[in-house]
């Protein structure tokens, strides 16, 4: 999306109210290829800090808003992201992997474009460069308290993120929201102007408010990237548009009571995907990140034995789309996958010989659908349908469109479901008692039984080839590792260790290997019972993001969704409609 397209969309979306606040001018601030993200203003409004990977790894740069020389203030071979100016402008808090237990981990929800990045530790450095010091371990999205005495950040287990505060001069972190009390995947955090409240954003684009001293969070809005106007009377935030693009909105808020006052006001609708809002001290300028990214279905040939690539990657579904969850048919001739080319997420079936695509026909077309799995005979697919309240339901649909039935009614967080090797059972997850647990359903009787009960979340379960085991990822113990359980038993066994986030498992055709993916980067394999990892793909990892790899039934191909594109920073001038350029 270019500046002209953005400007036209803003003019169409402007308010008819003569003195309403709206975007009056748009200009691009950064122009290099790659990723430029996470802008933050200095308190006096003269400087802008941001993150860019122009040098091959992420560094933090500082520049004057009107242009001029940019200063790399981190200049380290590690990854440095998510800067935040201190209230006095002398320091910048940021996240770095230079001494951390994990690298950066970029993840995305099953639908939509809202990436989140975590991994690393909290560091502080002088605003114009100098020696940095580590302030806290295992943290992301640092924000300064208004008095500059504390830094709050996000930590804890996936889907149960905690909020911690640490003294800016160093000391022990203090939990404001513990992982045990959290049921959210928190992606962004900010203080209110007087420091009385926290507002945090969740993965499913809900904005919650809680006292900064601790307490029970409550939802106040649906949206992303919230920023508090310096007047303390207004919140700005973004909303994803159903037909594509991003809405920029504001709403009046009473800081003293933490109450929303009146309905939201639209400042405009933009054709791009915007996030990372940062507002100037005078409240008249916003800097935003615009993402021009796609996630495209691709496949990679493997050598005999499946241990390395046998040729270059082939892109199977080009264009500005977001693909998800490829699934090979039992004969390996087709791939079912989720795709948003018609705005709503839908399941498509691609014939690999002819490259012909056909949409899976389902009733209730307004519900998003994704995560397909083939039946052993290749005649049916299970799919997950997403409901407005965040729940999911499980359907079995004939590939030829002759039937489609809901087999599991909407459940919170439901995801699934692969058929068992004999085609008689389904394996899936949903939230029960605050955690994602594994369930098995007998298809004929529709009887369900719970397979796991531990206080942890389970992801991406698959069957062993003989149907006696289930292998899955779990955040039990803090990091997401590979576990297994006997279908007839209840003992969960961990088979990998470490701090990486390991997801998206596949068995080799002979059952000897499990293919897996640490941190959404290159794909590895290990012996089915555990052991050292062997790297399979060899992609350069600077800016790499691969989703949901799946091995073909004959072991000759890997299918996955590969990220393409970049991001840049834009400056939005705020004013009234009377100030809008002609």
Image (cartoon, rainbow, N blue to C red):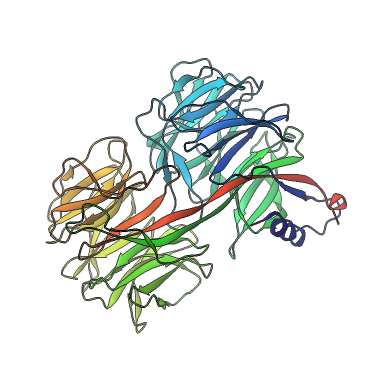
404 or 87: nearer the viewer:
87
Q: Position of residue 103 (x, y in %)?
A: 38, 35
How many numbered badges does the structure rendering display? 0
* Residue ID at (38%, 41%): 158
Q: Is residue 65 above or below residue 242?
A: above
88 sits to left or right of 465:
right
Q: Position of residue 163 (x, y in %)?
A: 47, 32
* Residue ID at (18%, 59%): 304
200 sits to left or right of 532:
right
For the C terminus, the image quarter is bottom right
* Residue ID at (41%, 27%): 98
406 or 74: nearer the viewer:
74
Q: Is residue 114 above or below residue 427?
A: above
The quadrant in which residue 68 appears is top right
Looking at this rendering, what residue extends furthest in the front direction? 311
516 or 364: nearer the viewer:
516
The quadrant in which residue 120 appears is top left
The quadrant in which residue 87 appears is top right
**Res 198 seen here:** no
Q: Position of residue 305 (x, y in %)?
A: 17, 57
Q: Position of residue 194 (x, y in %)?
A: 66, 28
């Amino acid at each position: 999306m270019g500046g002209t397209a953005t400007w036209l969309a803003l003019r169409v979306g402007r308010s008819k109210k003569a003195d309403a606040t709206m975007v009056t001018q748009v200009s691009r601030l950064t122009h290099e290829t790659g990723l430029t993200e996470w802008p933050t203003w200095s308190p006096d409004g003269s400087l802008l800090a941001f993150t860019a990977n122009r040098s091959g790894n992420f560094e933090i740069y500082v520049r004057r808003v009107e242009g001029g020389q940019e200063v790399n203030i981190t200049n380290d071979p590690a990854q440095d992201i998510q800067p935040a100016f201190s209230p006095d402008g002398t320091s910048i808090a940021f996240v770095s992997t230079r001494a951390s237990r994990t690298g950066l981990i970029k993840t995305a929800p099953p639908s939509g474009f809202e990436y989140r990045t975590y991994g690393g530790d909290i560091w502080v450095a002088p605003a114009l460069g100098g020696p940095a010091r580590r302030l806290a371990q295992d943290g992301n999205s640092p924000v300064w308290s208004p008095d500059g005495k504390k830094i709050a950040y996000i930590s804890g287990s996936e889907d149960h993120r905690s909020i911690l505060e640490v003294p800016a001069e160093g000391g022990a972190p203090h939990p404001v929201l513990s992982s045990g009390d959290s049921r959210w995947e928190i992606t962004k955090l900010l203080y209110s102007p007087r420091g009385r409240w926290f507002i945090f954003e969740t993965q499913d684009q809900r904005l919650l408010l809680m006292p900064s001293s601790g307490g029970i969070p409550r939802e106040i809005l649906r949206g992303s990237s919230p920023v508090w106007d310096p007047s303390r009377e207004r919140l700005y935030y973004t909303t994803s548009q159903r037909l594509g693009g991003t809405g920029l909105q504001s709403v009046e808020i009473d800081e003293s009571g933490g109450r929303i006052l009146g309905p939201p006001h639209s400042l405009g609708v933009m054709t791009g995907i915007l996030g990372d809002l940062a507002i100037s001290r005078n409240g008249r300028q916003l800097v935003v990140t615009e993402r021009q990214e796609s996630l495209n279905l691709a496949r990679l040939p493997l050598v005999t034995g499946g241990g390395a690539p046998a040729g270059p990657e082939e892109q199977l579904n080009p264009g500005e789309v977001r693909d998800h969850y490829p699934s090979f048919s039992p004969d390996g001739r087709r791939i079912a996958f989720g795709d948003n080319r018609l705005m709503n997420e839908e399941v498509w079936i691609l014939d690999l010989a002819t490259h012909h695509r056909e949409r899976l026909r389902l009733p209730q077309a307004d519900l998003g659908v994704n995560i397909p799995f083939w039946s052993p005979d290749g005649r049916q697919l299970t799919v997950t349908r997403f409901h407005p309240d965040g729940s999911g339901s499980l359907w079995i649909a004939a590939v030829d469109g002759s039937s489609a039935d809901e087999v599991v009614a909407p459940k919170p967080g439901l995801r699934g479901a692969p058929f068992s090797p004999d085609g008689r059972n389904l394996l899936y997850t949903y939230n029960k008692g605050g955690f994602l647990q594994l369930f098995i359903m007998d298809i004929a009787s529709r009887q369900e039984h719970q397979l796991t009960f531990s206080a942890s979340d389970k992801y991406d379960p698959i069957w062993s080839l003989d149907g006696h085991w289930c292998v899955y990822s779990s955040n039990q113990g803090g990091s997401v590792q590979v576990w297994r359980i006997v279908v007839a038993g209840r003992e969960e066994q961990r088979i990998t260790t470490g701090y990486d986030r390991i997801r998206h498992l596949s068995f080799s055709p002979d059952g000897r290997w499990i293919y897996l993916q640490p941190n959404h980067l290159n794909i590895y394999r290990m012996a089915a019972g555990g052991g050292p990892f062997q790297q399979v793909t060899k992609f350069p990892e600077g800016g790499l993001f691969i989703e949901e790899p799946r091995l073909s039934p004959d072991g000759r191909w890997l299918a996955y969704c590969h990220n393409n594109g970049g991001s840049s920073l834009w400056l939005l001038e705020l004013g009234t409609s009377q100030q809008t350029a002609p």
